[in-house]
Image: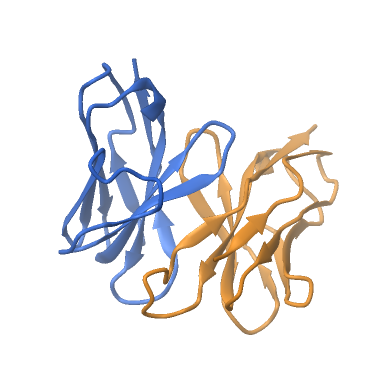
Chain colours: A orange, B blue
Amino acid sequence: AQSVTQLDSQVPVFEEAPVELRCNYSSSVSVYLFWYVQYPNQGLQLLLKYLSGSTLVKSINGFEAEFNKSQTSFHLRKPSVHISDTAEYFCAVSDLRAGGTSYGKLTFGQGTILTVHP
Amino acid sequence: GAVVSQHPSRVICKSGTSVKIECRSLDFQATTMFWYRQFPKQSLMLMATSNEGSKATYEQGVEKDKFLINHASLTLSTLTVTSAHPEDSSFYICSARASSGGIEQFFGPGTRLTVL
């Protein structure tokens, strides 16, 4: 079984400031890692994912996350946030075992509400 | 590509009635769809995994007779909340995984259910 912990439930920042949203996970097997963003009353949109290869992954809108296996972390960062980045962000892990009944199931963290102030 | 729709987006019903929510993959085939429930200010909790042509697999604690799932085609899964009660009020979100492979799930926009 996996679990995901997002250490901060709310993160307020000013526009153009840097931000880091923290995510730690625990799992007895290898996992894929994801960050999703949810705007009010909407479904989830994939922000970025780590499947394999380079441990640093980037999104098209300036976010990046680094997979750290030794620290079991996948923190999300952005060097300069915009008002439009205000949303709730969810970290998630997915079981890597192909063929098992749990294959592809996502386990979500509690979410972090990022509020960007002018 | 990879668009998932849900219908309705919002529904209000009386206690004791049943409500059906549809989840469609619009531009791809999905062998597997997932149903999640999200309470206010909480994370998504997986309710069940729906596989086309077979019975859904429910997570522990989810009543399969109350939350009926049907996945009759590769592009449609339905969730029916039977005899709904106010405590069933929630945001229900589906996701779909492409039959062509890959582990990524594509999420629908969600359905807000309010039971009076």
Q: Nearer the viewer, residue B113 or A56?
A: B113
Name which quarter of the figure residue A62 lies in: bottom right
Name which quarter of the figure residue B20 lies in: top left
Q: Residue at x 70, y 78 (%)?
A: A55
Q: Nearer the viewer, residue B81 or B113?
A: B81
With A57 as the anchor, is A118 left or right in this view? right
Q: Nearer the viewer, residue B70 or B87?
A: B87
Q: Quadrant of the C terminus of chain A?
A: top right
Task: From this view, report whether residue A109 is shown above or below residue B99.
Answer: above
With A65 as the anchor, is B104 left or right in this view? left
The residue sitting at the front extreme is B61
With A107 as the anchor, is A101 left or right in this view? left
Q: Quadrant of the N terminus of chain A?
A: bottom right
Q: Residue at x 82, y 39 (%)?
A: A13
The residue sitting at the bottom extreme is A53
Name the spot of residue A34 as percent of width and height, x first: 58, 63
Q: Residue at x 76, y 58 (%)?
A: A77
Name which quarter of the figure residue B79 lies in: top left
Name the spot of residue A99 as percent of width and height, x first: 36, 79
Task: From this view, report whether residue B61 is shown above or below residue B55.
Answer: above
With B94 as the anchor, is B56 left or right in this view? left
Q: Nearer the viewer, residue B109 or A112?
A: A112
Name the spot of residue B54 as percent of width and height, x first: 18, 63
Name the spot of residue A6 as percent of width and height, x first: 70, 51
Task: From this view, report whether residue A64 is shown above or below residue B23.
Answer: below
Q: Residue at x 57, y 74 (%)?
A: A31
Count of numbered marks: 0
Task: From this view, report whether residue A65 is shown above or below residue A112.
Answer: below
